[in-house]
Image (cartoon, rainbow, N blue to C red):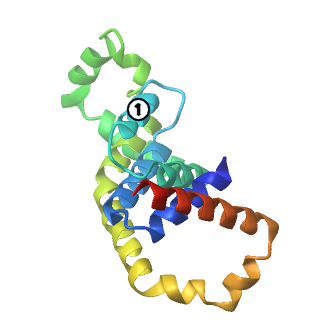
Amino acid sequence: MFVKWIAALIVALNANNRAGEIAAGISFAFLLALVPAGNLMWPILFVVTMLLKINFAAELLFLALFKLIVPLADGLLHRLGLLVLSPPFLSEVFTTGYNLPLLPLTRFNNTVVMGGLVAGLVLWVPVFLLFRRLVVVYRSSLRERIAGSRLARALGRVPLVAAIGGAVRKLGGLALRLR
């Protein structure tokens, strides 16, 4: 499964897919990684991403990568969530929301959930712009250098990398036949 995600991302990076679709997938992965799972908010956000035109392979692959790193930011997310949930003028809004039928299942009143949501929403556009630019730079100047390097040829002989290469060729051929 993980090999297929990597292969699909490589095919997308090297195909004519729009850089914005790949960057949007990565940005949504960042947002989903910041919001802890185990509440109703996470699956709602995930389903919303499945309804959008984004690169799903990029989203799943980067979600797995970001989920490994995000626990290091829990303290910052807690403080940000506390900052959002603490103002007295918002207490009535949050109390009303908590008394609604399904809204408490989102655990919006948890400081880490709220901090992750706010951080993810605020950082979505900068992450999108950064990764869209990185995809464009990769396609314009790095792709050919990487493909022709000795390191790439040596890595091609590693069994896992060879399996990914086979999946890329298979998916790439499928993509060419579909056009």
Using residue 23 as the reference point, say whether residue 96 is left or right of it: left
Question: Which image quadrant for residue 132?
Answer: bottom left
Q: Residue at x 57, y 85 (%)?
A: 146
Q: Quadrant of the C terminus?
A: bottom left
Quadrant position of residue 18: bottom left
Depth check: give the residue in front, 177 or 38. 177
* Residue that appears at 42% across and 78% down: 139
Q: Which residue is mark 1?
A: 47
Q: Secondary structure at mark 1?
A: helix
Tell me the crowding category of disc 1: few under 14, some 14 to 19, or many 20 or more residues within 10 angstroms, Cα based: few
Whether residue 110 is visible to the viewer of this picture, yes or no, is no
- Expressed as whole percent of the image width and height from the top left, the position of residue 77 reads 45, 46
* Residue ranking furthest to the left: 89
Q: Is residue 138 above or below residue 172?
A: below
Looking at the picture, how far across and down is residue 129, in whole percent?
30, 66
Residue in front for this viewpoint, 176 or 52 = 176
As rendered, which of 147 and 136 lies closer to the eye?
Answer: 147
Residue 62 appears at what percent x and percent y? 53, 55
Say whether residue 171 is visible: yes
Residue 159 on image: x %, y % = 81, 67
Q: Residue furthest front?
A: 177
Residue 162 higher or lower than 149, as above or below = above
Q: How many marks?
A: 1
For image coordinates 61% across by 65% down, the residue present is 169
Q: Is residue 153 left or right of residue 103?
A: right
In the rendered view, would you say 49 is above or below 30? above
Please give left or right for residue 61 compared with residue 125 in the image: right
Q: Quadrant of residue 128?
A: bottom left
Q: Amino acid at mark 1?
A: Val
